[in-house]
Amino acid sequence: MSTLVHPLAGQWGNTLKAKAAAIRLVAFDVDGIMSDGRLYFSASGDELKTFNILDGLGLKQLMQAGITVAVITGRRSPLTEKRMADLGIRHLMQGREDKRIALQELVADMDISAAQIGYMGDDLPDLPALQYAGLGISVPNGHWLVRQHADYCTQAAGGQGAVREACELILWARGQLDGTLAPYLADAQGSQP
């Protein structure tokens, strides 16, 4: 049982907490979720993309807790491939317009049910996957229809810590937040007078 309570945990009722506790796989969109959703190009036409470092640690926390992380994006980007490789994410599905089908493929490969999947997306191409998953999460800067169908909408915007917020709330609901934060808390507690 987790003794740490995430500051936003009060927004999660028993139903939402139960959905999150069942999660074995969380899949994320990239643009608008892991990034701010804007596309940047250099004068020579090279694509640039920003990722929030807080989100990266949240993804690692999920994986350390035994939760599989997948990334499903409609675009193809070598920058996304590099970032996911740096984080150790093995399930990267790029150029996937039908994200629900991509999720169904993961369900079949992992022998899990849709109820054991979390999906985080922000735009209309994410909606079928979000509705399919047992736990759907969106962001405040997402499309209104996606937010309306999500089980939870983060306080943080996409690309600004929303992924970390979702990861920590899932870990809290599963009673695993303490374990993933323990290495950091041990050092902090050891240095107190």
Image (cartoon, grey):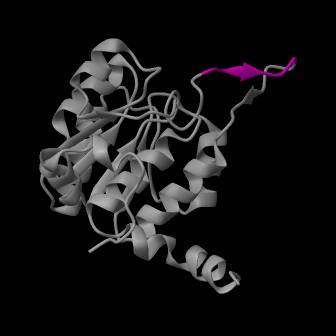
Residue 70, position in %: x, y?
40, 51
Q: 102 or 36, which lies in front?
A: 36
Query: What are the residue bounds of the magenta stretch?
Result: 38-43
Viewer-proximal residue among 175 and 104: 175
* Residue 135, placed above or below residue 122: below
Judge from the rendering whether residue 49 lies leftward or rightward of residue 43; answer left or right. left
User: Farthest residue toward the front?
Assistant: 193
Drawn side of residue 184 relative to residue 99, left or right = right
In the image: residue 90, left or right of residue 52? left
Instruction: Give whichever of 104, 138 is nearer the camera.
Output: 138
Percent across and percent down for residue 47 are 72, 27
Q: How many marks?
A: 0
Residue beneath the point at 33% across and 61% down: 172
Q: Position of residue 116 (x, y in %)?
A: 18, 54
Does residue 87 appear in the picture of this structure?
yes
Residue 39 within the magenta-colored segment of the rendering:
yes
* Residue 21 shown in magenta: no
The extreme right residue here reads 43
Q: Position of residue 21 (x, y in %)?
A: 21, 59
Q: In the picture, residue 3 is in which quadrant?
A: bottom left
Q: Residue at x 31, y 22 (%)?
A: 147
The quarter of the rendered structure image containing the C terminus is bottom right
Q: In what quadrant of the picture does the N terminus appear? A: bottom left
In the displayed structure, 148 sits above or below 21; it is above
Residue at 15% x, 54% y: name it.
18
Residue 84 appears in the picture as rendered: no
> Which quadrant of the structure image shows residue 16?
top left
Asked if 137 appears above or below 1 in the picture, the reply is: above
The secondary structure that dominates the magenta segment is: loop
Answer left or right for 145 relative to 139.
left
